[in-house]
Amino acid sequence: MASRKISRRMVIVAAAFGLALSTTFVANPQSASALACGGASAKTPWKSGSTIWGEGFAGSCSGDYRIMIERSRWYGWEAVAQSIWIKANEGTVVTYNCAGTGTHSFRSIVWKSGTTGGTVTTSGTFKASC
């Protein structure tokens, strides 16, 4: 009986203030930032023989992406290899033959077409002598 009285009072208060009551329940509420697309990742490059390997994942935002390997130069980062275009929720590896190029730091990046600056995420760096 007590619960009926509370329910009626809630309905009366809600009606008085123009509030709508809903019986819809959210099983797993998430913040707006958690619902935003994302998840792009770039793995720190590694070396096998004279080949530098980079790996990346595009994430969940729709669009066209490339995974790239860059090397450090005195003037900044230089793209030395890039993947074919991939779509959201796809990943790929990229290779670069560094034989005879000297010692450089390398990194992988995820690049998205149509975004300011293009770079979505960057990996850590890896230094190698080739």
Image: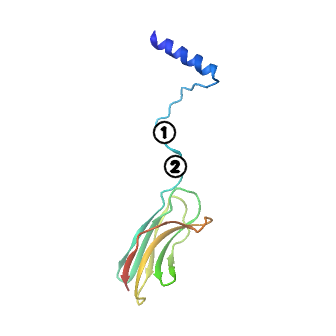
Q: Residue furthest bottom?
A: 100
Q: Which numbered dot is residue 42?
A: none
- Label 1 Cα neighbours within 10 Å, binned few <14 / some 14-19 / many ≥20: few
Q: Quadrant of the C terminus?
A: bottom left
Color encoding of the figure: rainbow
Q: Residue furthest left?
A: 49
Residue situated in front as seen by the camera: 88 or 28? 28
Question: Which residue appears at 50% of the width and 34% of the height?
Answer: 26
Residues at circles 1 and 2 in contact by the CB criterion of under 8 Å: no
Q: Which numbered dot is residue 29?
A: 1
x then y, percent, for residue 37: 53, 53
**Where does label 2 land, which residue?**
33
Residue situated in front as seen by the camera: 52 or 119? 119
x then y, percent, for residue 7: 52, 16
Question: Which residue appears at 54% of the width and 15% of the height?
Answer: 9
Vertically, is 129 above or below 45?
below
Residue type indicated by callout 2: Ser
Element under label 1?
A: loop
Question: Which residue appears at 54% of the width and 19% of the height?
Answer: 10
Vertically, is 122 above or below 98?
above
x then y, percent, for residue 119: 54, 68
Q: Nearer the viewer, mark 1 or mark 2?
A: 2
Residue situated in front as seen by the camera: 89 or 9? 9
Vertically, is 93 above or below 36?
below
Q: CA distance from mark 1 to mark 2?
A: 12 Å
Vertically, is 14 above or below 76?
above
User: Is 104 on the left or on the right of 111, as rendered?
Assistant: left
- Label 2 Cα neighbours within 10 Å, binned few <14 / some 14-19 / many ≥20: few
x then y, percent, for residue 45: 40, 73
Residue type indicated by callout 1: Pro
- Image quarter for residue 106? bottom left
Element under label 2?
A: helix
